[in-house]
Image (cartoon, grey):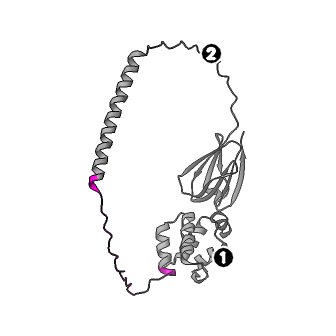
Amino acid sequence: MVSVGEKLKEARLKQGITLEMVEDETKIRKFYLESLEKGRYDALPPEVYAVGFMKRYAKFLGLSEREMVEEFKQEAYPVENGADFIIDEPRKPEKQINIPWKNIAAGILFLVVVIWLGGFVVDYISDYTTRSTPVQPSPAVTDITPPAEETPAEPTAELIIKATQKCWLSVMVDEEPAFTGILNPGEEKIFTGKEKVFIKAGNSGGINLNYNSADLGAFGEIGEVKEMEFIAK
């Protein structure tokens, strides 16, 4: 039976991703990544952190987070047989609360009368004001807005990435993270920057690029790790 660690390593190698790249993107130390892949569970931190590492690593590789976490728990933290006993604590006697219903009913009745009288007075004042205030005609408005001037188009960097093979990809747009993950065959991503777009691919031969409507073809060779910056123009 294939262990959960072997599944992680196999998926990573298929995508041409190194442990250093996983560490850089997931912020999980390489030591813990190797421990997950080799099944050295005694080297991992407490369970709550180790499960978080597994979930983040599986998501990065495009695997099912739920299935990988369940398999990991079964391997690393097998459930021991035994029954849990629950001891019910004695209940404290409930304190009875005496509610003065007569006073509450009187207060509600008084509030209803006040609201009704208030609405009557407001309606009377509103009707009197409407009848006594003459309607003034609206002044004519002359449109003096100057015609808008045409502004030259600002430079942009539009990069269209289409996957032909499974490929790990990291994209920065104007120095801000825009995407990190796996592109599957047929998937397409569009990134537009005001200054530049930077990409790094784990399998550069598995993606085709189109930059500002110019077809650039394959980004690199199959299995080649490659990165490039595209400046707006």
Along the line of sight, which residue is nearer the eye, 146 or 65? Answer: 146
Along the line of sight, which residue is nearer the eye, 189 or 124? Answer: 124
Determine which of the numbered discs, if any, sits on residue 144 in the image. Answer: 2
Q: Is residue 13 left or right of 119 when viewed as pictured?
A: right
| Residue 141: percent from left, percent from top | 56, 14
| Residue 121: percent from left, percent from top | 35, 29
SS at mark 2 in the image = loop
Residue at x 50% of width, y 14% of height: 138
Badge count: 2
Q: Is residue 20 rendered magenta in the image?
A: no
SS at mark 1 in the image = helix
Residue 103 vs 109, above or below: the answer is: below
Residue 214 vs 95, above or below: the answer is: above
Mark 1 closeness class: few <14, some 14–19, many ≥20 residues within 10 Å: few
Dot placed on the residue nearer the N-terminal end, 1 or 2: 1
Amino acid type, label 1: Phe
| Residue 203: percent from left, percent from top | 63, 60
Along the line of sight, which residue is nearer the eye, 230 or 208? Answer: 230
Along the line of sight, which residue is nearer the eye, 213 or 192? Answer: 192
Residue at x 30% of width, y 41% of height: 112
- Disc 1 and disc 2: Cα gap in Å? 70 Å
**Quadrant of res 49:** bottom right
Determine which of the numbered discs, if any, sits on residue 31 in the image. Answer: 1
Q: Is residue 43 left or right of 92 when viewed as pictured?
A: right
**Quadrant of res 40:** bottom right
Residue 31 vs 116, above or below: the answer is: below
Q: Is residue 76 rendered magenta in the image?
A: yes
Residue at x 57% of width, y 54% of height: 164
**Which residues make up the magenta segment?**
74-102
